Amino acid sequence: MTEAEWGRRDLLEAHGMAKEITALAPRVRTVTDGQEIFPGVRVRLTAGHTPGHAEYVITSGGQRLIAFGDALHSPIQVDHPEWSAAVDHDPVRSADHRRRLVAELEEPGTIGFGIHFADVVFVRVRRGGAGPAWRPLDA
Protein backbone atom coordinates (compact mmCIF):
# COMPACT_ATOMS: atom_id res chain seq x y z
CA MET A 1 0.00 0.00 0.00
CA THR A 2 1.13 3.56 -0.47
CA GLU A 3 3.17 5.27 2.22
CA ALA A 4 0.57 8.04 2.41
CA GLU A 5 -2.30 5.59 2.87
CA TRP A 6 -0.49 3.56 5.51
CA GLY A 7 0.48 6.82 7.20
CA ARG A 8 -3.24 7.57 7.67
CA ARG A 9 -4.20 4.18 9.09
CA ASP A 10 -5.58 6.14 12.02
CA LEU A 11 -8.66 6.77 9.83
CA LEU A 12 -9.31 3.02 9.72
CA GLU A 13 -8.59 2.64 13.41
CA ALA A 14 -11.16 5.37 14.09
CA HIS A 15 -13.71 3.19 12.29
CA GLY A 16 -13.06 0.25 14.63
CA MET A 17 -10.41 -1.54 12.57
CA ALA A 18 -7.53 -1.36 15.06
CA LYS A 19 -7.40 -5.17 15.37
CA GLU A 20 -7.12 -5.59 11.61
CA ILE A 21 -4.43 -2.88 11.36
CA THR A 22 -2.39 -4.58 14.08
CA ALA A 23 -2.63 -7.91 12.25
CA LEU A 24 -1.61 -6.36 8.91
CA ALA A 25 1.24 -4.19 10.21
CA PRO A 26 4.03 -6.79 10.03
CA ARG A 27 3.04 -7.69 6.46
CA VAL A 28 2.66 -4.20 4.99
CA ARG A 29 5.14 -3.06 2.38
CA THR A 30 4.72 0.57 1.40
CA VAL A 31 5.21 1.93 -2.10
CA THR A 32 5.70 5.43 -3.49
CA ASP A 33 4.34 7.34 -6.45
CA GLY A 34 5.87 6.15 -9.71
CA GLN A 35 7.51 3.11 -8.15
CA GLU A 36 7.71 0.01 -10.33
CA ILE A 37 6.52 -2.73 -7.98
CA PHE A 38 6.81 -5.55 -10.55
CA PRO A 39 8.15 -5.42 -14.10
CA GLY A 40 5.66 -3.33 -16.09
CA VAL A 41 3.54 -2.38 -13.03
CA ARG A 42 3.77 1.16 -11.65
CA VAL A 43 2.03 2.84 -8.73
CA ARG A 44 0.43 6.20 -9.41
CA LEU A 45 -0.94 8.30 -6.56
CA THR A 46 -4.27 9.94 -7.27
CA ALA A 47 -5.85 12.95 -5.67
CA GLY A 48 -9.11 13.52 -3.90
CA HIS A 49 -10.59 10.17 -2.95
CA THR A 50 -8.70 9.27 0.23
CA PRO A 51 -5.22 10.10 1.49
CA GLY A 52 -2.79 7.88 -0.38
CA HIS A 53 -5.29 6.45 -2.88
CA ALA A 54 -3.46 4.89 -5.81
CA GLU A 55 -4.06 3.35 -9.17
CA TYR A 56 -1.83 0.84 -10.88
CA VAL A 57 -0.68 1.12 -14.49
CA ILE A 58 0.29 -2.17 -16.12
CA THR A 59 2.05 -2.07 -19.49
CA SER A 60 3.02 -4.89 -21.83
CA GLY A 61 3.34 -5.35 -25.56
CA GLY A 62 2.21 -1.84 -26.42
CA GLN A 63 -0.97 -2.20 -24.37
CA ARG A 64 -1.79 -0.57 -21.06
CA LEU A 65 -4.27 -1.35 -18.31
CA ILE A 66 -5.14 1.24 -15.67
CA ALA A 67 -6.58 -0.30 -12.51
CA PHE A 68 -8.03 2.88 -11.08
CA GLY A 69 -9.46 1.65 -7.78
CA ASP A 70 -11.92 4.10 -6.28
CA ALA A 71 -11.28 6.95 -8.72
CA LEU A 72 -14.53 6.02 -10.49
CA HIS A 73 -17.42 4.42 -8.61
CA SER A 74 -19.86 4.26 -11.52
CA PRO A 75 -19.66 4.35 -15.32
CA ILE A 76 -21.82 7.52 -15.22
CA GLN A 77 -18.77 9.35 -13.85
CA VAL A 78 -17.09 8.88 -17.24
CA ASP A 79 -19.71 11.27 -18.63
CA HIS A 80 -19.89 13.32 -15.43
CA PRO A 81 -16.48 13.37 -13.74
CA GLU A 82 -17.67 16.27 -11.61
CA TRP A 83 -20.00 13.88 -9.75
CA SER A 84 -18.11 12.70 -6.68
CA ALA A 85 -18.79 9.81 -4.35
CA ALA A 86 -19.77 10.70 -0.80
CA VAL A 87 -16.49 9.22 0.46
CA ASP A 88 -14.26 11.49 -1.64
CA HIS A 89 -12.24 13.57 0.82
CA ASP A 90 -11.66 16.35 -1.70
CA PRO A 91 -14.40 16.38 -4.38
CA VAL A 92 -12.70 19.09 -6.47
CA ARG A 93 -9.38 17.24 -6.67
CA SER A 94 -11.07 13.89 -7.28
CA ALA A 95 -13.13 15.41 -10.14
CA ASP A 96 -9.97 16.88 -11.65
CA HIS A 97 -8.33 13.47 -11.46
CA ARG A 98 -11.35 11.78 -13.07
CA ARG A 99 -11.20 14.22 -16.00
CA ARG A 100 -7.53 13.38 -16.60
CA LEU A 101 -8.20 9.67 -16.11
CA VAL A 102 -11.07 9.61 -18.63
CA ALA A 103 -8.90 11.43 -21.18
CA GLU A 104 -6.13 8.91 -20.59
CA LEU A 105 -8.56 5.98 -20.90
CA GLU A 106 -9.53 7.29 -24.35
CA GLU A 107 -5.97 6.82 -25.60
CA PRO A 108 -5.38 3.93 -28.04
CA GLY A 109 -4.22 0.67 -26.48
CA THR A 110 -5.60 1.58 -23.04
CA ILE A 111 -7.98 -0.58 -21.02
CA GLY A 112 -9.62 0.47 -17.77
CA PHE A 113 -10.29 -1.83 -14.83
CA GLY A 114 -13.06 -0.61 -12.53
CA ILE A 115 -13.60 -2.82 -9.50
CA HIS A 116 -16.93 -1.11 -8.63
CA PHE A 117 -18.52 -1.77 -12.01
CA ALA A 118 -20.23 -5.09 -11.25
CA ASP A 119 -19.90 -7.53 -14.15
CA VAL A 120 -18.35 -5.05 -16.62
CA VAL A 121 -15.00 -4.33 -15.02
CA PHE A 122 -12.76 -4.29 -18.13
CA VAL A 123 -13.57 -1.51 -20.55
CA ARG A 124 -12.36 1.01 -23.06
CA VAL A 125 -13.49 4.62 -23.13
CA ARG A 126 -14.49 5.81 -26.57
CA ARG A 127 -15.69 9.20 -27.69
CA GLY A 128 -19.37 9.03 -28.69
CA GLY A 129 -22.05 11.56 -29.68
CA ALA A 130 -22.02 13.83 -26.63
CA GLY A 131 -18.72 12.79 -25.08
CA PRO A 132 -16.75 9.85 -23.73
CA ALA A 133 -18.55 6.55 -23.29
CA TRP A 134 -17.79 3.46 -21.24
CA ARG A 135 -17.56 0.47 -23.63
CA PRO A 136 -17.31 -3.09 -22.25
CA LEU A 137 -14.28 -4.95 -23.53
CA ASP A 138 -15.23 -7.73 -25.94
CA ALA A 139 -14.32 -11.15 -24.64
Image: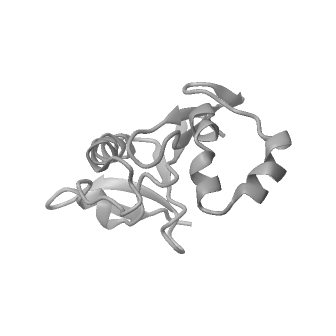
Which x, y percent locates residue 36? 65, 26
Q: Is residue 45 above or below residue 24?
A: above
Which x, y percent locates residue 49? 42, 49
Q: Specify whether 35 is left or right of 91.
A: right
Q: Nearer the viewer, residue 60 or 105?
A: 105
- Regarding residue 25, the answer to whether it shows in the image is yes
Residue sitting at 40 percent across and 39 percent down? 47
Q: For the view shown, which residue lies furthest in the bottom direction?
A: 119
Q: Is residue 118 above or below residue 14?
A: below
Residue sitting at 57 percent across and 66 percent down? 139
For the N terminus, the image quarter is top right
Q: Nearer the viewer, residue 26 or 14?
A: 14
Query: Picture quarter containing residue 99?
Result: top left
Which x, y percent locates residue 69? 52, 52
Q: Specify whether 47 is left or right of 3.
A: left
Q: Identify the colour scheme used.
A: one colour
Q: Nearer the viewer, residue 77 or 3?
A: 3
How many numbered marks does the figure carry?
Answer: 0
Which x, y percent locates residue 22? 80, 50
Query: Picture quarter containing residue 12?
Result: bottom right
Q: For the view shown, which residue lies furthest in the left direction?
A: 130
Q: Is residue 24 above or below residue 31?
A: below
Residue sitting at 63 percent across and 45 percent down? 9
Q: Is residue 37 above or below residue 83?
A: above
Q: Nearer the viewer, residue 7 or 43?
A: 7
